Amino acid sequence: MAFVFKGKKYLSIEEIKNVLPIHPTTLSRMLKNGDIPGAGKIGKQWYLPENKLEEYLNTRFRIEP
């Protein structure tokens, strides 16, 4: 479940996997290893600011606006 904190939208693994076709376990490992910078854990759940996912996609896949 995504949430907003101080004007930033944070995505859970469930939301991220809808954008990236990656198994949730692989995605968790990527977040833990810092492959996608900016992620953090709240309890047992990983969250990533939406803008960090966009930055990752733009650098990884060179998406043009």
Image (cartoon, rainbow, N blue to C red):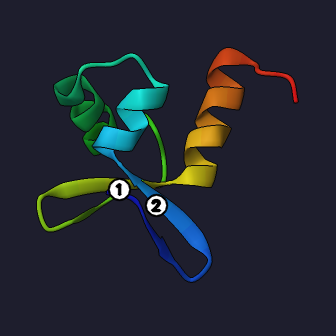
For the residues bearing labels 1 and 2, Cβ distance under 8 angstroms:
yes
Quarter of the image for residue 6 reads: bottom right
What kind of element bears circle 1? strand
Quadrant of the snapshot with the C terminus? top right
Q: Is residue 34 visible?
A: no
Q: Residue at x 46, y 61 (%)?
A: 10
Q: Amino acid at mark 2?
A: Tyr
In this view, the residue in front, 2 or 36, is: 2
Q: Seen in the image, is 24 located left or right of residue 61? A: left
Quadrant of the snapshot with the N terminus? bottom left
Q: Which mark is residue 22?
A: none
Q: Amino acid at mark 1?
A: Tyr
Position in image of residue 54 (x %, y %): 64, 40
Q: Seen in the image, is 58 located left or right of residue 47? A: right
Quarter of the image for residue 14 reads: top left
What kind of element bears circle 2? strand
Position in image of residue 31 (x %, y %): 33, 41
Q: Is residue 56 visible?
A: yes
In this figure, which residue is indicated by the disc labeled 2?
10
**Looking at the image, which residue sits at the far bottom?**
6
Q: Seen in the image, is 59 located left or right of residue 33? A: right
Above-or-below relation of 38 to 13: below
Q: Residue at x 62, y 29 (%)?
A: 57
Position in image of residue 33 (x %, y %): 30, 38
**Looking at the image, which residue sits at the far left?**
44
Q: Which mark is residue 47?
A: 1
For the residues marked 1 and 2, what is the alpha-carbon distance in whole angstroms?
A: 6 Å
Q: Residue at x 49, y 28 (%)?
A: 19
**Crowding near pointer 1: few (<14 within 10 Å), some, many (20+)?**
many
In this view, the residue in front, 24 or 14, is: 14
Above-or-below relation of 35 to 37: above
Choose the circle earlier in sequence order: 1 or 2: 2
